[in-house]
Image: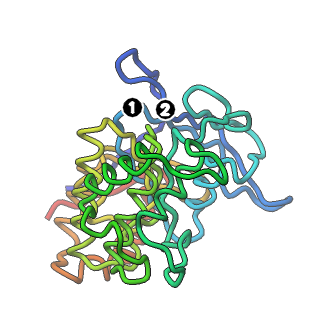
Amino acid sequence: MNETMFLETAAPSPTADRPEILTVQDLTFAYRREIPILKSVTFSASEGDFAAVIGSNGAGKSTLMKLILNQLTPTSGEVRLFGENVRTFRNWPLLGYVPQGNSYLNSEFPASVEEVLLAHQFPQIGLFRRAKRQHRERVGEVLALVGMEDFRTARIGTLSGGQLQRVLIARALVNHPKLLILDEPTTGIDVQNAHALYELLARLNRELKLTILMVTHDLVHAVNYARTIFCIEDGNLAAVPPKELEHELAHRHHHAGKDECEHVQAIETHHSACCSCTCTYTEE
């Protein structure tokens, strides 16, 4: 039995109990005069949402993140953070960002976990000022949240990939953000640590009502944890119900253990049709 799914995305209206966190409206972007990488992209996230963005390499996922973070200027359309245009937004502590591949931290730098987290509190501490007790207490709080309280004095360079990723998440949480953006959070870590990382994100989302938006190739985990999955292809963005992708994975792909992450790229390539808003599923 073949079933074709067509779904157009639109930004749902925020409600009083779930206020608007992120809105992307008719966003188009092109480098110089080239063909647009993103074309009239529209979606939104309200408080407590957990969304993943998938797509093949070069589809525009990282470009979308840079536009949300105000690192690029759109050709047309707009991004709003907490109701304010990103071009004039200044309250950046409300947004926590975990970059791809641990690229924000030099693992050879002789800094402890605590020092890295204190340095990220400079909006509260002030430049060239000493951290106070409340700032050190906050370090302990976020390390406990991510299960890294025993590594407070450890040097960054001694941590495993999974431990370092948890420290980066703690770093992103230290200023009490309401939106957490992650770029390929499971890159370079094994399946066991990837599973633990998604469990952590699900708990933060549930207990703190933290809105989460991530770019990922890890479709196997994304379908089990994200409540909304957006797919980008040929500059277009569409929402794909996780249950539909879960069904397809169950019937078309049978990977276990370490093979799950090794084959994610192949799975995602297979699903590229989802991004053009038409998916055909075959029930076996």
Against 45, residue 104 (above or below) is: below
Against 186, residue 81 (above or below) is: above
Q: Which residue type carries mark 1?
A: Glu
> In which quadrant of the rendered view does residue 233 lie?
bottom right
Task: Name the residue at the top extreme.
Answer: 16
Could you tell whether 87 is left or right of 112 in the image? right
Give 279 or 125, whichever is nearer the viewer. Answer: 125
Give 160 or 235, whichever is nearer the viewer. Answer: 160
Badge 2: residue crowd in 10 Å (few <14, some 14–19, many ≥20) = many
Q: Position of residue 155 (x, y in %)?
A: 41, 78
Q: How is the image coloured?
A: rainbow
- Where is the C terminus found, in terms of image quarters? bottom left
Lower sequence index among marks 1 and 2: 2
Badge 1: residue crowd in 10 Å (few <14, some 14–19, many ≥20) = many
Q: Residue at x 23, y 65 (%)?
A: 249
Give 40 or 199, whichever is nearer the viewer. Answer: 199
> In which quadrant of the rendered view does residue 19 lie?
top left
The residue where tag 1 is placed is 47
Determine the CA span between mark 1 and mark 2. 6 Å
Q: Position of residue 62 (x, y in %)?
A: 58, 61
Would you say the residues marked 1 and 2 are in contact, meaning their CB atoms lie under 8 Å apart?
yes
Q: Position of residue 106 (x, y in %)?
A: 55, 78
Q: Residue at x 52, y 63 (%)?
A: 99
> In which quadrant of the rendered view does residue 219 lie?
bottom left
Q: Position of residue 234 (x, y in %)?
A: 60, 59
The residue where tag 2 is placed is 21
Q: Residue at x 47, y 46 (%)?
A: 132
Against 236, residue 250 (above or below) is: below
